[in-house]
Amino acid sequence: MIEIMPIGGYREVGKNCTAIKIDDEVIILDMGLHLQNYINYTQDDDDVDLSLKTLTEIEAVPDVGVIKEWIPKVKAICISHAHLDHVGAAPFLAPEFSCPIHGTPYTIEVLKVLLEDKEIKIPNKLIAHDVNSIFKISENIKIEFISITHSIIHTAMVVIHTKYGKVVYANDFKLDNQPTLGNKSNLGRMAQLKDVKVMIIDSLYAGKPIKTPSESVAKELLREVMISTNSNGKAMIISTFSSHLARLKSVMEFAKQLNRKVVFLGRSLEKYIRAGENIKVIDFSKNGKIIKYRQQVQSFLKKCKKPEDYVFIVTGHQGEPKSVLARMIFNNYFRFKKEDIVIFSCTIIPGEENIKNRERMEAELKKKKVRIFRDIHVSGHGAREDARDLINLIKPKNLIPTHSQIATTEQFLELAEELGYRENKNVFLLKNGQRIQLK
């Protein structure tokens, strides 16, 4: 029998974690942070209690107490990709389980970097598997990592092969036929999957009646702003998701066309770039300077006599108060001039605090008469039509939406019903801690 226990990420965004029990063996899928709760707790003090007990109490990590009796039966932790809402809780949670952590090469390397930077040692063995590979967990369970596109490289659709059928975990994904870095989605292999008992699927944008545009579209949006805008004599500052190596690669390409040097400023940028360079999927430091620490960032910007010769890639796209961009604006790290260019290659992550922080940041930039380019971005999450295509391709017997608030989960239900599924018969809107058995 297959049992599924949602631990985090159901009817909420963040804290992604799901336990799958097959007879007497358990697989954990993802161990993510609730980023806003974690940031709120840690941002004002570098010396805070990061014990599992405290992080669970503030709801920054999944509460594995709901699978207390399953803990001795856990055979593997499988991480789908390297975003912090999927891997960021592993340094704190993984030691609760006597098993290895499996992931794709970039995912495992990011986890290693996180552990190094936090000076945390965990007993779990870290095992990297190539995308589009299959490996054995036990006599009864195999795991397959199928390449699927997202806004971070080496994202995997995780497939658990059992004698009762397959469990497919597609959280997060989009169906991008023209990615600018990394593999395409392996649609051929997905179409070959037979006897899929259940698919757990990213439904963040199930209410958007579109197919999410390709990353190649975001590249063209960037090209239009960076190349076509008259930037002679002006500083150019860009902020995007630090983990989005494909986007950073595009920025570097256009900076080269502009004959500008690239400087990466900020800790999180350095972490994700370091991980990528460690496994040789990128080589940004060959043509760009990477500055990690606050004092070094401040010193570099203060000494920079000709900012018009650079493209500054900085942290702070969500308006985070301690980010490099915030310090440039509010702490006088940088002297902005009229019509300098600031590009936000991102969307604002929904949340009252993010929205207020960005509004405050943009208001100050407007006072400085800076040119602001917002939303130079496409999402890494599939929308309604991506979900439809994936469901039609894989044809799962049962569906479970995840990675969404209640309203979006109900919008996913509408799509599922269009495709012939029925609530509580073969599509299940689960809450954290709500166990389901599939016979």
Image (cartoon, grey):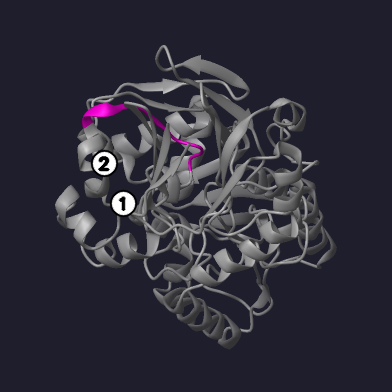
Camera-nearest residue between 8 and 194: 194
Could one spot residue 32 in this view of the protein? yes
User: Measuring 23% from the left and 34% from the top, which residue is drawn there?
Assistant: 71
The amino acid sitting under disc 2 is Leu
Q: Quadrant of the N terminus?
A: top left
Left/right of residue 320 with respect to residue 38 in the rendered view: right
The residue where tag 2 is placed is 93
Left/right of residue 179 with respect to residue 43 in the rendered view: right
Q: Which residues are magenta?
A: 72-82
Q: Where 438 falls versus 383 (above or below)? A: above
Are discs 1 and 2 less than 8 Å apart at CB? yes
**Hey, which quadrant is residue 68 in on the image?**
top left
Task: Return the mark for residue 62.
Answer: 1
User: Measuring 66% from the left and 55% from the top, which residue is drawn there?
Assistant: 309
- Tag 1 secondary structure: loop
**Hey, which quadrant is residue 249 in on the image?**
top right
Q: How packed is label 2: few (under 14 Cα within 10 Å), some, or many (20 or more)?
A: many
Q: Position of residue 197 (x, y in %)?
A: 57, 36
Could one spot residue 121 in this view of the protein? no
- Tag 2 secondary structure: helix
User: Measuring 42% from the left and 77% from the top, which residue is drawn there?
Assistant: 353
**Hey, which quadrant is residue 367 in on the image?**
bottom right
Q: Where 50 falls versus 177 (above or below)? A: below
Left/right of residue 123 with respect to residue 355 in the rendered view: left
